[in-house]
Image: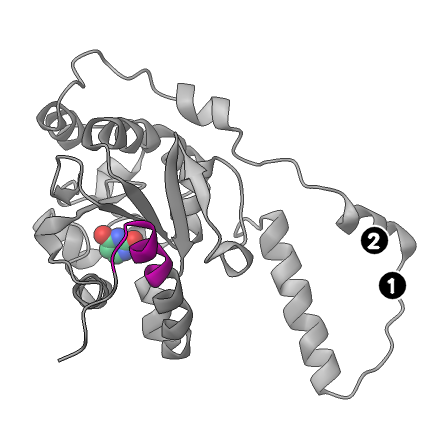
Amino acid sequence: MAETTYYGLIEDIEKYLEYQRDEGVQRLEVDRAVLEALAKDPEPEVPEEVVVDAVPIPDDFQSLEAIVAHVSTCTNCDLCQARTTTVPGEGKSDAPDILFVGEGPGAEEDMQGRPFVGKAGQLLDKMIEAMGYAREDVYIANVVKCRPPNNRKPVKDEMKMCLPYLRQQIALIRPKLIVGLGGTAIEGLLGKPVSITRMRGVWQEYAGIKLMPTFHPSYLLRDPSKKKEVWTDLKLVLAELGKVPPSRK
Ligand code: URA
């Protein structure tokens, strides 16, 4: 059975209530115990300490090349079994303005060994261009470096095993800002379950670096009406960098 996070459950309940309202239902009886349980703050499901300590980071991870080499033979989780190739990340590695973090490679990325080169990647390229950058001006990486079968969301253990690579990449790359694409990226970076619908557009912080959560390009392909929100988020990122979007041709 698929795992449900606290926030996922809240979103399902919201959808259910909206459906009932649209059907004309005006009152629902709810048990007091259920309301009390929902009102409590959830326990983080991926405690930060566990994520950080999951896999000891070897000392030779003092360069991106060392990380790439280590990732290419990594067998820390079962994702290694079905991968064609690993997808460590790419882009401007010396203090880029922006690091984009996604969830994990899809089919095309798994074939090419490069992040965001499929349909979602083409949309990400357009977003980057609309911000006045080229793909080579930013760094692009993922929470997990191997493709999860059928593009499913990586499970907690896979994220735990892979996150040290991303953390060390960020420490070496020193981006000015991070844009987290989708809930999984934000969950990985913040080490707790999140609702991307609530958190998008609201600055967070990862290791002293400002982090902007926004929707994943794959979600925008499914629901293009959400592009407006993402553009609002990306303009906040540009403003933080002291830039304005270039005028459209
Ligand atoms: N989706 C992601 O999250 N990352 C990729 O690299 C491609 C698609």
Residues under numbered marks 1 and 2 in contact, where contact means CB atoms less than 8 Å apart? yes
Q: Position of residue 175 (x, y in %)?
A: 24, 38
- Name the side, left or right, on which 138 lies relative to 191: left
Task: Name which residue lies at 11% across and 46% down.
Answer: 113
Q: Position of residue 82 (x, y in %)?
A: 22, 44
Task: Name which residue lies at 26% across and 32% down.
Answer: 170
For label 2, the residue is 34
Q: Residues within 10 Å of mark 1 (few under 14, many from 20)?
A: few
Residue 187 in view of the camera: yes
Q: Is mark 1 within 8 Å of ligand 1?
A: no
Q: Which residues are magenta?
A: 234-243
Judged from the image, the secondary structure of the residue bearing numbered disc 2 is helix
Q: Residue furthest front?
A: 242
- Name the side, left or right, on which 109 lies relative to 224: left
Three-letter amino acid code of the residue under disc 1 = Val
For label 1, the residue is 30
- Name the side, left or right, on which 60 lies relative to 205: left
- Most foreground residue, 40 or 127: 127
Judged from the image, the secondary structure of the residue bearing numbered disc 1 is loop
Using the rendered view, name the quadrant where residue 236 is placed. Answer: bottom left
Calculate the distance from the C-alpha at mark 1 to the C-alpha at mark 2. Answer: 7 Å
Using the rendered view, name the quadrant where residue 28 is placed. Answer: bottom right
Task: Name which residue lies at 14% across and 45% down.
Answer: 84
Residue 150 in view of the camera: no
Q: Quadrant of ligand 1?
A: bottom left
Q: Position of residue 241 (x, y in %)?
A: 28, 50
Q: Is residue 20 positioned above or below 237 on the image? A: below
Three-letter amino acid code of the residue under disc 2 = Val
Q: Residue furthest bottom?
A: 24
